Amino acid sequence: MLHIKCPHCGMRSQNEFSYGGDASVKRPELGKEISDQDWDNFVYNRKSLRGKHWELWQHLSGCRQWIKVERDTSTHEIFNTLKATEEIS
Amino acid sequence: MTQSFRLENTGLINRSKKLSFKFNGKNYYGYEGDTLASALIANGVHLIGRSFKYHRPRGFFGAGVDEPYAIVQLYRNDETEPNVKATEQELFDGLEATSVNCWPSVNFDVGAINNFLKIFLPAGFYYKTFMWPKSFWYKIYEPFIRKAAGLGVASTKHDKERYEHKYEYCDLLIAGSGPSGLASAYAAAKNGARVILAEDKARFGGTLLTDEVNIGNKSGKEWADGIIAELKEMPNVTVKNRSQVFGYYDHNMLVMSERISDHLPETKKFHPKQRLWYIRAKEVLISSGSIERPIVFGNNDTPGVMLSSAAKEYLKVYGVLVGKNPLIFTNNDSGYETAIEFKKNGIDALILDTRKDPQSEIVEEAKNLGINIKFSYVVVAAQGYKKVKSADIAKISEDKEVLGEVENIKCDCICVSGFWTPTIHLASQSGNKTKFNESIDAFVPGKSKQNEKTLGAANGTFTLEETLKSSFETGYELSKKITNTDNKTSFPNVVEKKSTVHDKFWCVPLPKGKNYKRFLDFQNDVAVSDIEIALKEGYRSIEHVKRYTTLGMATDQGKTSNLNGLQLVSKIENKVVPNVGHTTFRPPYTPVSIGAIVGREVGKHSKPTRKSPMHYWHEKNNAVFVDAGVWLRPRYYKQGNENLFEASKREAKNVRSNVGVCDVTTLGKIDIKGPDAAELLNRVYTNAWLKLPVGKARYGVMLREDGIVMDDGTTTRISENHYHMTTTTAQAANVLSHLEYYLQLVWPELNVNVVSTTEQWAGAAIAGPKSRDLLQKLFPNNDVSNEGLPFMGYMEGDLFGVKARIFRISFSGELAYEVNVESDNGNFMWEKIIEVGQEFKIQPYGTEALSTLRIEMGHVAGSELDGRTIPYDNSLEGLLSKKKDFIGKRSLTRKAFTAEDRQKVVGVVPLDKKTSIPEGSHLVKDSNAPLPNPKLGYISASCWSVEYDNPFSLAILKDGKNMIGEKLFVMSPLKNKVIPVEIVSSHYVDPKGERVRS
Ligand SMILES: [Zn+2]
């Protein structure tokens, strides 16, 4: 079970969180023209990286905040966590 | 029977407490403090079971967790448990156990024929058998294997024991209470660290209980007892015996299984049987010790052949002799310690040492005691079938290839020591890359990956002084880092006998003309010849060899067999052991009961049960409940001998003709506040929300980004910046997360807050032509006329002194209202509605009637909004705004979603107007078409229409728009039904929706 540092609550066990996918995906702006290809990339296509990447988790059974977590998908090492509003550097 | 192998004065057992027990139906006695194994050996019982594959007789090999084959079926307090190791099971009064793997009995076993038909079960037996014709498998092999194989029988009864889970945090978790565990725990605890010290066995101390050492002028055991007593008194220390740390997971999380009641005849009242600890430790110290490894020789599985350390443990801890004429076969000094212990108790052992001329303090002591030693000697084979009767021994050449003349000597047990294998399972599980240590011929932990360190014998350190020194130091250093205090404990003086190097000898060659079975893995019956076959057949990777031969599998996990297996592979392959590598160590280190893993989440406790504030009224009024997610909802209210069908029909009819009331508390409710609330709704719902006036409700549909309908419900504007959203019962939690996702991550600029209020409001739906009359009586001060409170209107009211929210919304398709009050007033509201409603012939209705009402009205719900349908499929395309963008809108232009013959919801009526249509049935054009019959659609929901008094269903049908009036067939292969049907509009009753507006 992972140990995730919620930027609002501190270190908490994984079973308080729910996984939310790739944090680097940006939703296209509302009302803007977008090609089928770009829309498909947003809705369906994910890289499923091996190694370090940023992902979303929601602290569901805690503060209910969505957070960004930098994790290595093969070792589970967590390097950094950010609030939803903080930009990935 | 007398305990003829029990010593008078030796041992740590309590001789004043005699315990009776039964093994294979026979009565025996033992003492408090015995294990089942020690008590059986004390009674001279060495035949305990049959081996897995060849059904050869099996005895005891170890004295604890390392035991590969003394596995029994245990009976305790009217329950039975398989896979219990006799060496770990503590004796209690009335214990009963039987052998496994024997049929019909342990003494006469039909399966032993396998032993003579070896050809039948060579390496890869299972792989090869599966390849054989299928018919052979079912008719011949499976029944045979089922009868002959297996490690016991699981109970089929409900387990009445309780198992608990516990979450714990600590600075230092120490696995194992031998010298390194005790020293590091003591040093760290004295320095203020929060310590958990876990010991698998009942007694603390590990090898200190059996080794002749002196620490601080005390015996090893006295020193250990003193440390434990002191640790137990410290508030920052948790000391647990009978607790196995069996798994090392991510982020320094370890799981420990504590056996609280297994050693008692029955579990004490209010106590659990076992407790599973999830421990998050800042640092972990692995002090799991080492396991003696066997030397491989002919018939080395005969009962009476056992590890020399086990013989010593039986003697010193339990006061039990494993034999009275022992032969000790060793390649190092450890065997001598066992011989010395025998000698002290008046038993003369013969030592066979593979070494030529070892020089050490221990060897010297043995010589001085007059113990008979033969150097450069080996055991070629054990003789005797159900128990060792003699041994074939021979001198061995210096290159260890050539045997001298074989002679036979009498003995009743063979105690083997092939040096020590560090127990690195936990370290390996943590991700530590282990390395091979040439000098001890075994793997030891390498570079730490998590916050873990391995100490003492588990790290390949076999001298006590070095072990204690490094453990005191490590405990102190780690605790200093965590607690920032600097309280160093002094290091005690250690006296131990010096030993010399071991001989890297592990397998005795076969003498000419003999073909003895030489076993590597005792639990899985893997012999040297099996590995040779596997390699001959082309298996190279150690992982493949393992799976092909079953070496190191099952509950044993290769505790005694791993390294000898590797030695063999490396010898045949002409590689060095580190290049062969070892198989992956996976948790659990020892078997864990399913009960402990499941904990208390069993049966109805597997999920929480949520009840509405009106639940007890429903109960009192004969409600029959149904699970709706985690909620319990009334399905119908039973009157007299009514069944589900009759009751729901009555309830639904009463709604259509009078008035009914339904508990809708379970609907998800979300409070939405903020200046941008309308903008948020406008983005998440498909229809327009910016112009909804205060005091009005609107029906809305929300989509996922892929265009699939996520949920529907009504949202009401309570005041300028305050909205009350309802969701379906099932999607309540997902919708809240969905809103939070967009507010926090996608549109943080929106000034809106959302919070679940599902539990804050109790809801009652009042539906039927007389509902307005009832409402007027409930709220005499409100104008609830069609003008005062029109369809989709909202107002607040006073319900006999209780504040209420009144919504004019309808799910049943009738004139209907929903009244919400704070949850605490829910039951009051409900009772008032029933009381005042009497004159209007009010009846409560359950979910079954509710479904009937919505189905015949053609209102889509969960069975249509099933995560596979878009708005068009549900005839909700009228709610798609063309003027604005919303979540999922872009996906609706996808090709499949705009196809001309796109599926759509329709109504289905059987031609005979009698036959009920099973939900989930398929719709086809031709009921006799060859399979696979092209499927045009499926039945999503079925009811008995109370309006027309005939069956009616909703279906999602291909090209549904153009199918109205078509005749099709409903097919349910599951129910073996074919029903001719007509496709009609999904709006079967009141298609214009006049009633809700009346
Ligand atoms: Zn949090």
Image: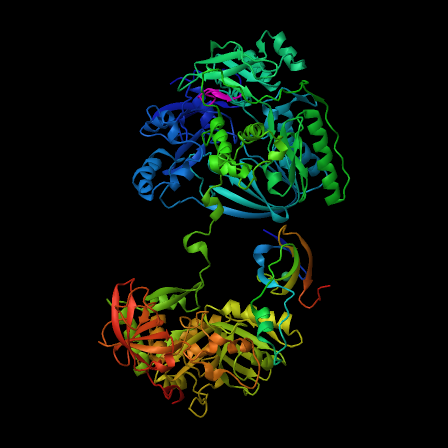
What residue do we see at 26% from left, 63% from top?
B976
Q: Nearer the viewer, residue B470 or B228?
A: B470
Quarter residue B451 falls in: top right
Left or right? Give the position of A74 relative to B823. Answer: right
Residue B247 x/y as whole percent:
56, 42
* In the rendered image, the vertical position of residue B162 relative to residue B494, given as above or below: below
Name the magenta segment's main secondary structure.
loop
Q: Quadrant of ligand 1?
A: bottom right
Q: Is any part of residue B53 visible from this angle? A: yes
Tell me the magenta residue range.
B298-307
Q: Nearer the viewer, residue B845 or B296?
A: B296
Residue B375 is covered by the magenta coloring: no
Quarter holding the C terminus of chain B is: bottom left
* In the rendered image, the vertical position of residue B635 relative to residue B48, given as above or below: below
What residue do we see at 62% from left, 80% from top?
A32
Name, please, the residue furthest toward the bottom: B787
* In the rendered image, the vertical position of residue B501 relative to residue B856, given as above or below: above
Residue A47 x/y as whole percent:
61, 61
Q: Is any part of residue B846 visible from this angle? A: no
Residue A79 x/y as whole percent:
69, 55
Q: How many marks?
A: 0
Left or right? Give the position of B977 relative to B554. Answer: left
Residue B983 x/y as whole percent:
31, 79
Q: Nearer the viewer, residue B614 or B90?
A: B90
Quarter holding the N terminus of chain B is: top left
Q: How is the image coloured?
A: rainbow
* In the rendered image, the vertical position of residue B35 relative to residue B390, given as above or below: below
Quarter residue B990 falls in: bottom left
